[in-house]
Image (cartoon, rainbow, N blue to C red):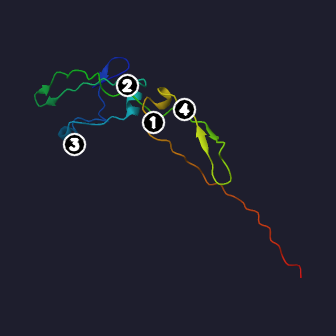
Amino acid sequence: MIRQADGEYSETTSECDGTDASILQHHQCYIRMQVLRDAPYSLDLNTVVEIYVVATNAKGTSDPSEVNTEGGIVQNVPQVQLTLERGELTDATKVQLVWNLLPEGNDQGFAALTQYRILWEVAQVFVQRTVISDPQ
């Protein structure tokens, strides 16, 4: 059971169905961060995810475990687009790209950045050629 923003607890069988044979065997499941951000949980970024577990068999359901208050932190993808600039060292043989670091916290999605990827498109380039003919 996961604590929602309103303080109530509910479960997510779409993400962690405790009747699934693999979950029963391995005693673990994964819940996507977006599920925690969306209703009914509606958890804010940088919120500790509070979870408890109950076990059920043919005789009934156990008392809940203690709430895990040291669980994961709700995180997200970086929220701010970087401003890319052409660096001073750009010349005919290379392009230098320069950007500012994202501030920690919400801008980084409350998760340490692990990489920057540089993506580009190759635009059609029209090359003008001059043909010199021999006027004989």
Point 43% across, 28% down: residue: 110
Nearer to the camera, 42 or 72: 72
Label 2 secondary element? loop
Q: Position of residue 129 (x, y in %)?
A: 77, 66
Query: What's the mark number on residue 56?
Result: none
Q: Are marks 2 and 4 in contact (CB under 8 Å)?
A: no
The tag earlier along the polypeptide, 3 or 4, is 3
Can residue 38 be seen here? The reply is no
Nearer to the camera, 119 or 37: 119
Q: Tell me which amino acid carries mark 1.
A: Leu
* Quadrant of the snapshot with the C terminus: bottom right
The tag earlier along the polypeptide, 2 or 4, is 2
**Measured along the vertical axis of the image, is residue 125 above or below residue 111?**
below
Q: Measure the C-alpha gap from mark 2 to mark 1.
A: 25 Å
Which residue, given by chain and number where applicable, does mark 1 sit on? 113
Which residue, given by chain and number where applicable, does mark 2 sit on? 41
In the orientation shown, which residue stands out farthest toward the bottom? Answer: 136
Q: Measure the C-alpha gap from mark 3 to mark 4.
A: 38 Å
Q: Measure the C-alpha gap from mark 2 to mark 4.
A: 24 Å
Q: Measure the C-alpha gap from mark 1 to mark 4.
A: 12 Å
In the orientation shown, which residue stands out farthest toward the right? Answer: 136
Q: Tell me which amino acid carries mark 2.
A: Tyr
Q: Is residue 68 left or right of residue 48?
A: left
